[in-house]
Image (cartoon, rainbow, N blue to C red):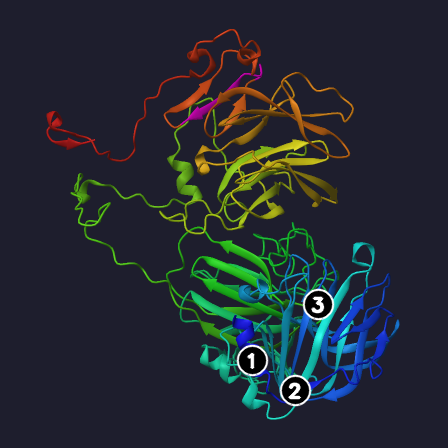
Amino acid sequence: MRHLLIAKVKQNLPWRSLITDNSLKTWQKIGGDADYQLQGDTIIGTSIQSAHSTYFTTGEIFSDFIFEVDVQAQAPLNSGVQFRSEKIQSKKGETVAGYQMEIDTAPRAWSGGIFDQGRRGWLYTLSRNENCRKEFKVDDWNTYRIEAVGQNIRTFINDVPCSNIVDDLSASGFIALQIHSAGGDKVNKTVKWRAPKVLTTNIQAHLNKPADIEQFSYINNQITAEQKAKGWQLFWDGQSNSSPQQSGQWQVKNQALTADAKQQNNSLTIPVTSHYFELEFDVNSSDNADNGIHYLRDKNGKGFEFQLSSETTVEQTDNNNQAMGAIVGRVAPTNLTEPEGWKYLRINKGWNRVRLVVRGTQIEHWINNIKMVDYQSIGSLPTTVLPVIIENTKGTMEIKNLKLRNLPKPEVAAKKSNPGDREGHVMKKVVPEELIPEAPILDIEQAMKSFVVHPDFAVEVIADSPLIFDPVFAIYDAAGRIWALEMTTYMLDTLATGEMKHDSQIVVLTDTDKDGTMDSRQVVLPNLVLPRALAFIDKGIIWADNSSLYFSELTEHNGNISVIKTDVVDKDYAKGGNVEHKPNGLLYSLDNWYYSAKSNKRYRPYPLAAELPKDTREIYRNQYWKMAIGPTEFRGQWGISQDDYGRHYFLDNSSPLRTTSFLPNVAYRNKKQSFPKELINQNVGSNDVYPIRVTLRYKPWLHGRYV
């Protein structure tokens, strides 16, 4: 009903159709040779096997206008609507350059974004506009709208705001319908444009209302009224050589602050008033430069660094924590915005827009509107707020469009004097507060001193934050590397807020200098939901998230591990229950089966032609092996291990360690024989616990002391 109402309101506007005389005789192709046909009021473009994109246009030039068309696109074809565009000559022949409103049928879902075809690339991704990402319907009709007035350009899908840019590169040009170059399953796919029309008179009266989406400006060293209203401050006007505060030798060239570290280091000082801020600017670094943003610095000047180096090859590896976009020495840059497997980091040769978001201990690094780092720092914030330093220590560096805004601090909920479990419930203090010792978070050095272990054992630190955080499981591979599951969203508060976000990952830690301590980190599988099991298998790894068991085929080149593909092995592996009451572990046992805690199922890969044992069945196969599933004794709750004899060890909520007195599946093998529970699930040692904190028991015979 909403779309019918909108159509009724707009039907009397002075639109002009781009289809005249019910034919396409005024239209022409530029570039490729994809097929375009007219059916009624609909232009149908069909992709062909070609390395060239095709652009279909009347050639008519428009400056300020509103354009609308209904779009229907088949997956997996990529397409778009060009506007304010021109014909250019490239090395491959004639093509088109100019703005494009994206038609994206891929899972990335950036339909409605603005791509600068043949020039600068993406100007407005949908990485920060979830509403528009959800709006485009593949294989269904969608109303596209472009508003281009002066330097202001906005796009909409079904009247949902998608993009909002300010740019001065093209003030006019033609409108064209693109069929992208295609191969494989993208060939012979169609895009339909129904009733393309343009409005060029009395435009201001017919613009959509301003939308609350972020505006991106590409006007050098200026700030828009909309940005100013959202708290942005411009820190350099493109002319002054004295502001912001400078150290070293800076010059103004081509509307940019320029420095060269050949003779000395150079820096800019950006004052911040809190640990909650957002900094954005455009940077151009020479090849193999070493530049960075230093922030959250302590009184000794130590803190975090956003690497701004420009590598010779912009296809950087996930384990390179010195690469552009990294938290130097801590976290490597990864494309966290586009779907899993999209390895390209979208770092340009030349100018890149960098964005640093600091919300206390929560840190984000962005480059060209692609999130590279999303990191939760462990520990407290510096007590003193020190300025941000942009530093040039090697090579050249150019900076423009330098902007900063403060972010609101999170509100701290008012603490009840004696909170209860229900309305009107008053909780009495069981232990006087003065008798409860403090329990501060310890740093690594303090924590190591607090351990008391048997003389035959030693505790050493091999990896700590920020190399690894929130690990719930870890195993070594044959190269001595640690593969770990980071469950970063588990119980962030008592309401489990954000627990089901795709923010966890599988990481690999490497000791590159062979000193016994891990010093390099690579994210192998990002964007997971509560990963809980991991094991090695032929050609890759098997692992589980909050619901299913997966196989990820891997390849490795020069230490860089890449995922070829990921398949579901058992969709019901961790079905039902809460986080602590689901299968986990995946222990590869001495009998060549994989066993899990909190489970009565076991798994084993077999050759494709092998006959499966009795009581097992095939649940998955690939080109290398097939997976069998079979029954076993139920064991444990969280975590599972084995000794040199193949006996399993596990635990539950009330026992620190349990085991069996024999190899796995011996008790299950003979269904007519009943084994005593204490043999199948046998306590090891004592359940006695010696608390280091006061407990809630009050013993009056101990002179009223709390213990």
Q: Is residue 100 left or right of residue 603?
A: right
Residue 651 part of the magenta-drawn span: yes
Q: Is residue 223 left or right of residue 31?
A: left
Residue drawn where x is 46% and y is 74% of the image: 405
Q: Position of residue 671 (x, y in %)?
A: 54, 10
Q: Which numbered disc flags the more N-terminal residue, 3 or 2?
A: 2
Q: Nearer the viewer, residue 529 or 480?
A: 529
Q: Which numbered disc flags the more N-terminal residue, 1 or 2?
A: 1
Amino acid type at circle 1 is Lys
CA neighbours of label 3 inside 10 A, class few (<14), some (14 to 19), many (20+)? some
Q: Which numbered disc flags the more N-terminal residue, 1 or 3?
A: 1
Q: Is residue 654 above or below residue 264?
A: above
Q: Which residue is mark 3?
A: 348
Q: Is residue 690 left or right of residue 681?
A: left
Q: Position of residue 170 (x, y in %)?
A: 70, 85
What residue span does the magenta drawing correspond to? 644-652
Residue drawn where x is 64% and y is 51% of the image: 340
The Cα atoms of the two marked residues, 1 and 2, are separated by: 14 Å
Q: Which residue is mark 2?
A: 15
Q: Is residue 120 above or below residue 618?
A: below
Q: Look at discs 1 and 3 and give the one toward the viewer.
A: 1
The reply to whether discs 3 and 2 touch (Cβ–Cβ < 8 Å) is: no
Q: Which residue is mark 1?
A: 8
Question: Which quadrant does the C terminus fall into?
Answer: top left
Amino acid type at circle 3 is Asn
Q: Position of residue 490 (x, y in %)?
A: 45, 44
Q: Nearer the viewer, residue 116 or 425?
A: 425
Quadrant housing residue 54: bottom right
Quadrant housing residue 556: top right
Q: Is residue 144 left or right of residue 651?
A: right
- Residue, far bottom: 202
Q: Nearer the viewer, residue 221 or 48?
A: 48
